[in-house]
Every structure is written in C-alpha cells, then in structure tokens.
Image (cartoon, helix red, strand yellow):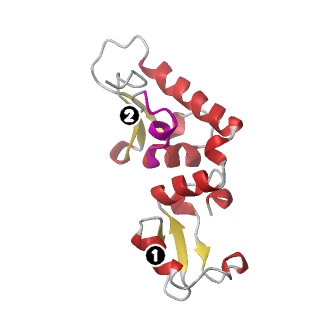
C-alpha cells in the first residue's frame, strides 16, 4: 500500500479488500491491522476499503525498504533545507508559516503532508528537532525557530 501511495495524501487513496494483490492475506489480518493503528476502514459501506494511517505509511516505507533508499533520503534532506530556510536568521519567536499553495512544487504537497502528519522527518533525523507541523486551521505548514536544532 505504501508503494502505491507515491505522492498522494494518505486520505486520498483507498484500497479495496477485494484487490487481487491481497488475496493471500488472512482474514484475521484485516482485523489486526486496524487494531495496530496501521489502516482504517473507509466509511464506504458497499465494499470493504481501507486507508493507510500515518503509522501504517511509516511501517510500509520501512518494510519495502524506502526508508533506506538514497533518493528518498535526499528528498527528505531537501525538505529539511527548505523548512530551515524559512527560519534561518529569524528574530521572532513565532514559527514561520507557509500556506500550502505557496510551497514549492517539488516535492508534491501530498507527500509533504504525509511527512508532516506521520513524523517521518523525526524518524529519519532523530538527533535533530524535526518539529515542523501542519496547521489545519490555516492550511499551512508551521516551522518553529528551533527546527533542525540538536535534540538535548
């Protein structure tokens, strides 16, 4: 599922349980995965469909080897550099804010949203404060002035 998602927002892709790729999955797995917080069932009632959660996306990226991929890591580094550029030299204690429509076209917004909601950057760079976050009320990314500083 994580591979299929690519740059789409987590909420933008559903997988039907009837997908032939899932034919060998035990019925109990469809109960266990939501219990573990890795998928959620779609509210569509006519056929069982599932969405990945943030934790499910991270688990999928780990399982399929994406977290160890150099291109993927480079993409994360570029996002960190962009976020850091928003707060470098700031005198204000307030976080920088950039509306989602003002984000650079690369990487795509869906991927950036997934990264922020899942905490992926903190997982990739555990020794730094990867505390940028999505602010739903303003449809913006907020970047605290402490972003990318060493963790105490």
Counting the numbered discs, the total is 2
Within 10 Å of disc 1 (Cα), the crowding (few <14, some 14-19, many 20+) is few
Work out which quarter of the rendered image holds the C terminus and state it.
top left
Residue lying at the far left of the rendered structure: 93
Per the rendering, the mark at residue 144 is: none
Residue 105 appears in the picture as rendered: no
Q: Which mark is residue 131?
A: 2
Q: Position of residue 132 (x, y in %)?
A: 41, 34
Left or right: 92 with respect to 20? left
Is the magenta region chiefly helix, strand or loop?
helix
**Residue at left 46%, top 75%?**
32
**Residue 34's x, y, as percent?**
44, 72
Q: Is residue 123 magenta?
A: yes
Any magenta on residue 1?
A: no
Magenta stretch in the rendered image: 118-127
Quadrant in which residue 133 is drawn: top left
- Label 1 residue SS: helix
In the image: residue 79, left or right of residue 35:
right
Q: Residue at x 66, y 39 (%)?
A: 72
Residue 118 visible = yes
Q: CA distance from mark 2 to mark 1?
A: 31 Å
Mark 2, mark 1: which one is toward the viewer?
A: 1
Seen in the picture, residue 66 relative to 35 is either above or below; the reply is: above
Residue at image mark 1: 32
């Amino acid at each position: 599922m994580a591979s299929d998602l690519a740059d789409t927002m987590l909420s933008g892709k559903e997988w039907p349980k009837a997908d032939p790729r899932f034919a060998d999955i035990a019925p109990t797995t469809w109960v266990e995965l939501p219990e573990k917080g890795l998928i959620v069932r779609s509210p569509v009632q006519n056929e069982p469909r599932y969405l990945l959660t943030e934790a499910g996306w991270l688990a999928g990226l780990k399982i399929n080897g994406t977290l160890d991929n150099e291109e993927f890591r480079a993409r994360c580094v570029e996002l960190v550099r962009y976020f850091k550029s928003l707060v470098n030299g700031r005198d204000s204690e307030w976080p920088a804010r950039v509306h989602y429509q003002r984000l650079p076209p690369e990487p795509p917004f869906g991927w950036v949203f997934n990264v922020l909601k899942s905490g992926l950057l903190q997982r990739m760079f555990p020794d730094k404060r990867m505390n940028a976050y999505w602010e739903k009320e303003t449809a913006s990314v907020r970047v605290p002035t402490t972003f990318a500083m060493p963790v105490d």
